Amino acid sequence: MDSFHPMFNEINENIVQISTNITQHPKKVRKERSDKRKDIRIPLTSETKQLIKKISFQYNTYPTIFTSDLLTESLHRFNEFELVEYPIHSKSLAVAKLDKETFEILRNYCIEWDCSIRKAAHRVVINSLRKEGYIV
């Protein structure tokens, strides 16, 4: 069957074959920031989240910064954290941003307590609020 275009009617023996070896540029690996922080979403009861908001606004800061500082200070200062009730179906979340060193300390507690990062962070936050006198 002939095509309308004459180029397709002729069989050209001098067809240049396209090479299948396409040179790919290696992907540039971006350096990781030395001060990179890990985000942790901590489930809290609505009352505890309101308390954190109230305290953070008293210190003229945001709840994320307050929760991050609270976690960091308590992980470096305290060694004993009592077992607390974990809110399984809580929709109230507090966010904390931890540096590598503090995150490693929290991860060691996760291994010691055999729980998740969220549960360990919740346990530390509630115990530190109790030790500071905000929760009875």
Image: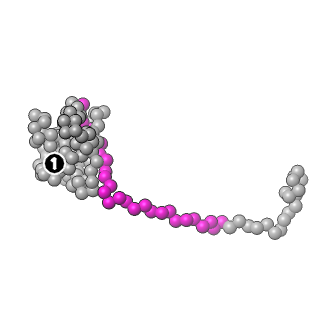
The residue furthest front is: 60
Q: Residue sitting at 68 percent across and 67 percent down?
A: 19
Q: Residues within 10 Å of mark 1 (few under 14, many from 20)?
A: some
The colour scheme is one colour
Magenta stretch containing residue 44, yes or no?
yes
Residue 34 position, x and y percent, is 32, 60
Residue 21 position, x and y percent, is 63, 67
Magenta stretch containing residue 22, yes or no?
yes
Residue 47 position, x and y percent, is 21, 30
Decide if residue 59 is on the left or right side of residue 40. Answer: left
Task: Tally the numbered discs.
Answer: 1
Q: Is residue 30 above or below residue 43?
A: below
Range of residues picked out in magenta: 20-46
Is residue 118 visible to us here? no
Decide if residue 7 is on the left or right side of residue 116. Answer: right
Q: Residue sitting at 35 percent across and 58 percent down?
A: 33
Q: Residue sitting at 37 percent across and 59 percent down?
A: 32
Residue 30 position, x and y percent, is 43, 61
Q: Which residue type carries mark 1?
A: Ser
Q: Is residue 1 above or below residue 57?
A: below
Depth check: 34 or 47 in front? Answer: 34
Decide if residue 58 is on the left or right side of residue 13. Answer: left
Magenta-colored segment: predominant secondary structure: loop
Circle 1 residue? 74
